[in-house]
Amino acid sequence: MPSKVILVLLDGLNFEVARHALGHLQAYRAAGRAALYKLECELPSLSRPLYECILTGVAPIDSGVVHNNVVRLSTERSVFHYARAAGLSTAAAAYHWISELYNRAPFVAARDRHTSDTELPIQHGHFYYVDHYPDSHLFDDAESLRLNHAPDFLLLHPMNIDDAGHKHGLNSSQYRNAARVADIQLANYLQGWLDAGYQVLVTADHGMNDDRSHNGLLPEEREVPLFVLGDAFSLSEAAAPKQLELCGTICELLGVAHDKPLCRELLR
C-alpha cells in the first residue's frame, strides 16, 4: 500500500556518533520498532553532491554535481519529481541548496525562502541559508509544513551537527552534543509522524573527520546511519541498503512509478 514518507537528513552525522548518541531513536530500535543500518556515502563526501545522490539515486560523478559550488538545477529526476508526476504533494524544510537543486537557481532569499507553489517540484518549503540556523527552528518549520499541507513526501534537513563538526571536529563534545540535540528534537515529533501513518527514514549525507572537514575516504567521513521506522519496513538484519538506493526505496514507499535502484529487503 502506498505510504506517506518523511526523510530526515541529519547533515554531517557520522555513523558511530549516531549509534551511541541518538538515544531516542535507539529506544525504538531496542523495542523492535526501528532498524539501524550502516551506509557508505558516495564520493566525493561533500554535501551538495550527496543531497543530489540521495534524492535522485545518481552518483555525483554521473550527476555532474561534483562539489558544493555547482549552483544549478539538477538535470536528474528526484523523489520530488516522481511524487509530483504521480499527483502527490511535496514539502521541504531544508538548506537553500535543496531549493537550488530542485526549484530555482540561484537561490534568492526574498523569493525562495518561503515557497508555496503547486507547480514546483518542492511545492511547499522553508529554506534557510546560514549553517547555524537552529535545528529547533528547522524541526518546527517542518512540522508547520506537515500540519498545514499534509505532504505525501516531506524532507527535513537540519545543519547544526555539520556546523559543530566544522567548528570543533569529530572528536569533540560540541559535535556529539549537536547530535544529541537533534535526537531530542526528533523525540518531539517522531511518534506523532508514525501515528499519522508516515514511514520515516533518518540518515546523513556524509560524516566528519578530526580535521573539521570531509571530502575523502576515511571511514569517519563516509560511514553514515540509516534508521527506518514504520510498518512498511521489514526491519530485517539481512538488508544491506546503499545510499544510491534511498531515492528508489522512497519512491517504492510512496507507490510512484520510478526507474531508480532500491533496496527491496528494507521493505515488507
Image (cartoon, grey):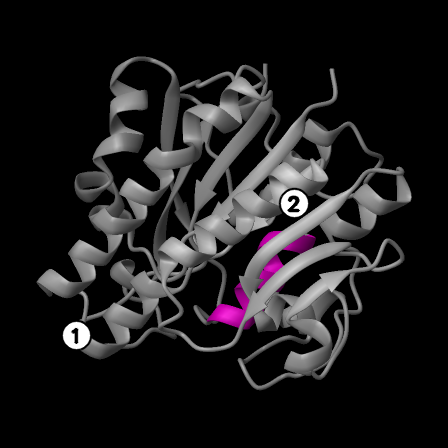
Could you say whether the residue bearing mark 2 is in a helix, strand or loop?
A: helix
In percent of width and height, residue 228 lies at 46, 30
Task: Please give the label number shown on residue 268.
Answer: none
For this view, does 47 lie left or right of residue 182? right
Q: Of label 1 and label 2, which has the lower sequence position?
A: 1
Q: Is residue 187 left or right of residue 68?
A: left
Distance between the alpha carbons at the discs numbered 1 and 2: 32 Å
252 left or right, relative to 120: left
Task: Give the image quarter of residue 178.
Answer: bottom left
Q: Which of the image's four quarters has the C terminus?
A: top right
Q: Quadrant of the N terminus?
A: top right
Please report the residue visible at 60 percent of the width from the left and 20 percent of the height from the top: 197
Image: 139 above or below 69: above
Write the residue at 44% across / 18% down. 236
Magenta span dominant secondary structure: helix
Assess disc 2: are there few (<14), some (14-19) or many (≥20) residues with their C-alpha within 10 Å of its C-alpha.
Answer: many
Q: Position of residue 262 (x, y in %)?
A: 65, 36
Residue 131 falls within the magenta-colored stretch? no
Q: Which residues are magenta?
A: 47-56
| Residue picked out by circle 2 | 247
Which residue is painted at 57% across and 38% down in the image?
6
The magenta stretch spans residue 48: yes
The correct choice, above or below, for 115 with respect to 89 in the image is: below
Residue under the point 53% across and 43% down: 143
The reply to whether residue 106 is visible in this rendering is yes
Which amino acid type is marked by label 1? Answer: His
Task: Give, as a three-letter code, the residue at label 2.
Answer: Cys
240, above or below 61, in the image: above
- The spot of residue 120 in percent (x, y) is 83, 60
- Nearer the viewer's eye, disc 1 or disc 2? 1
Q: Secondary structure at mark 1?
A: helix
* Residue placed under numbered mark 1 in the picture: 168
